[in-house]
Amino acid sequence: MERLTPLRVIFDLDGTLVDSAPSLCHAGNAMIAELGRAPVDVATYKTFVGRGMRKQIEGLLAHTGGIPEDFEQCLARFRAIYDANPLIKTVLYPHVLDALAEVQAAGHSLGICTQKPEAPARFVTSGLGLMPPITGLTCGDTLDVLKPDPAMLWHAAEQLPAGRIVFVGDSETDAQTALNADVHFVLHTKGYRKGEIATPYRFDDWAEFPAILQEIALAT
């Protein structure tokens, strides 16, 4: 990739860099099995992901029989199961590491802005070789807000050298975060979005991403 004006490239994690829905679904099904409820499939579970862990478990419980009065205990039990090993069934999307290496070699800095709490986020990113090259990390328990509040994105960007911000995500929440922050948004179309998202920058395969970022860098 040609060296251009450096950008601060911030990535969502779940559904963008990693396919974690099978892992989250595994933990969620283990939790609801203790309540005597039937499991859900991964495709269904994906519809609960993207607005933070609390909303995720609310969605799962509502779908499988209703939110019980002891919701906080259910949430804590899910966290205990998931945090024990969040790498179970979690994989990088193909070509992610090659794309990140190419983007970094072009002089851009890399960060993550995720709704996932810090403990499992660091477990996943370190376990899958994402940090480094990614250096900045803002998680769902870093601030007192979640995406689409742009404060999360700005916090991630503040950890990186100066440059225009580009946000890469897979969901409606991510797109709204970029809009609220008034930055370019790039959509990973193989993630967990619920419907169509209007954006001129999108990709199916991570091998396509460096060229898209170069196009954005040339336009800034």
Image (tube, rainbow, N blue to C red):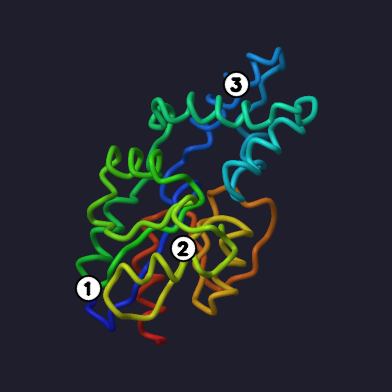
Q: Quadrant of the C terminus?
A: bottom left
- x, y percentage for residue 188? 50, 57
What's the residue at 39%, 65% (across, down)?
156
Q: Is residue 169 left or right of residue 33?
A: left
What's the residue at 28%, 66% (across, down)?
103
- x, y percentage for residue 164? 38, 80
Q: Type of residue at label 1?
A: Gly
Marks 3/2: CA distance? 31 Å
Secondary structure beneath dot 3 equals helix
Q: Is residue 24 left or right of residue 55?
A: left
Q: Type of residue at label 2?
A: Val
Q: Residues within 10 Å of mark 1 (few under 14, many from 20)?
A: some
Secondary structure beneath dot 1 equals loop
Q: Residues within 10 Å of mark 3 (few under 14, many from 20)?
A: many
Q: Type of residue at label 3?
A: Met
Q: Quadrant of the N terminus?
A: bottom left
What's the residue at 55%, 29% (across, down)?
76
Tell me which numbered mark, 1 or 3, is placed earlier along the sequence.
3
Point out which mark residue 168 bears.
2
Tell me which numbered mark, 3 or 2, is placed earlier along the sequence.
3
Point out which mark residue 82 bears.
none
Which one is nearer the viewer's eye here, 100 or 176?
Answer: 176
- x, y percentage for residue 63? 76, 32
Q: Nearer the viewer, mark 3 or mark 2?
A: 3
Point out which mark residue 107 bears.
1
Which one is nearer the viewer's eye here, 176 or 219?
Answer: 176
Marks 1/3: CA distance? 44 Å
Which one is nearer the viewer's eye here, 78 or 206?
Answer: 78
- Give the residue pinned by disc 3: 31
Residue found at the far left of this picture: 105
Quarter location, residue 111: bottom left
